[in-house]
Image (spheres, rainbow, N blue to C red):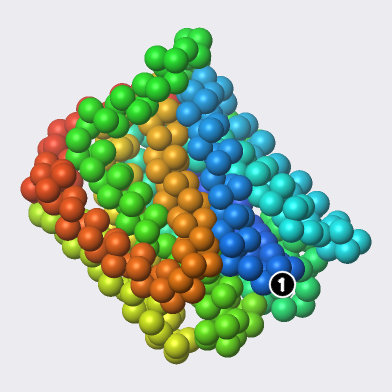
Amino acid sequence: MTWLTRHYGELLAQRAFMRFWIARLKGVMANQMLMVAVGWHMYDLTGSPWDLGLVGLFQFVPALVMTLPAGHIADRHHRARIFAATTATQGLVAAALMWGTLTGQVSREMILGLSVLLGLARAFQMPAQQALPPLLVPRELLPRAIALGSSGMEIAIISGPALGGVLYTHGATLVYGTCVALLTLSTMLALAVHYTRSVHRASMTWASLFSGLRFVRQQKVVLGATTLDLFAVLLGGATALLPMFARDILHTDASGLGLLRAAPAVGALTMSVVLTRWPLQRQVGRRLLLSVGAFGLATVVFGLSESFWLSMVALAATGAADNISVVTRLTLTQLETPDDMRGRVAAVNSIFIGASNQLGEFESGATAALWGPVGSVVAGGVGAMLVAVAWTRLFPELAQRDHMAPAATPVSGLGAPSA
């Protein structure tokens, strides 16, 4: 407790930020539990890797279509209220699945339809939650706020799948009911977040809608790092196939699936602690590319493994390697983006993240239907390593980048929180 107070005492005094931090922690935990339950439930119903991929695709498409408008809305309206609306929507999805399970009405079509709602919620949630912290804390506390937010996310991503898997062994209804409770609490906390904000009344035009894309395109290092993460995770992600690996290859149950889903976050949390103690200061681009290569190699090991614990270690290694890319991208983006653009730039990041995750799940399911789960994951890992090699030539500015950011970068437009 003394360590926490010494390092985060000033941040803990920021009531608006802490309310949002707890709301986000509970919301992400519930979302991770929901994803474990939905994946296992779908595989129970159909036993099809194609359908597991479709769950990701049905989330990705609406998120892709709506994310840019959502970023514009996040720059014009109260971001905490937008976040609250998205967690409330996810709570309704969990409630519908709980009702469907109790009445025996859950079907393949129902899960896919609700996946669309989850994709829509994600489209509006990501820009709002990424652009909100700079408005809740003073400028000098922003780096620690980002670090604490990242740690909270990893804790939720670790505990959510593990808890969801354990609860699923006692029935899907228990998982969905727990998600409803957590998401309701998250919504209430978010609604209690208040801050002083500047109102941007510019109308939505095609130029303003795509201004975030233009901003990222002009920042070559940011563009290179973001697209590197996009293609590496798109090819190397194995999340959608974890139910198949858990049941058919590693011979474990839903609790084992929860542990497998949590393993990448364990690696990511470990790496975030390492980077907090020894931050990347030199040869940033080179280390970023090496981390993507390591991500691909660990993915190959997971694909070939028939040991549960080796698979856990390999997945943890993918999370640790991916965390380097996440920290690099968020740091560059937060430092170089003015507040009146943060929602739209966060929307662009959301598109890349969504494409690498949800579209990657569809790609994994589709290739697994053709080559089997092992062939799909191994090919994806090799593809991620090839992407790392290709980006050294396509983005020399990134490969040769030495420092994380310019020594002095102006930060403008930060608001002051109010209780």
Residue drawn at x 39%, y 55% as measured from the top left? 234
Q: Position of residue 406 (x, y in %)?
A: 14, 37
- Looking at the rendering, in which quadrant would you find the N terminus? bottom left
Q: Is residue 233 visible?
A: yes
Residue drawn at x 77%, y 52% as measured from the top left? 110
Q: Position of residue 310 (x, y in %)?
A: 40, 85
Residue type at mark 1: give it. Asp
Viewed as shown, does residue 81 lie left or right of 348? right
In this view, the residue farthest toward the right is: 103
Q: Is residue 204 above or below residue 60?
A: above
Viewed as shown, does residue 13 lie left or right of 62? left
Q: Quickly name the residue at label 1.
A: 44
Q: Is residue 154 above or below residue 353?
A: below
Along the line of sight, which residue is nearer the eye, 20 or 316? 316
Residue 54 in which image quadrant: bottom right
Q: Position of residue 204 (x, y in %)?
A: 50, 14
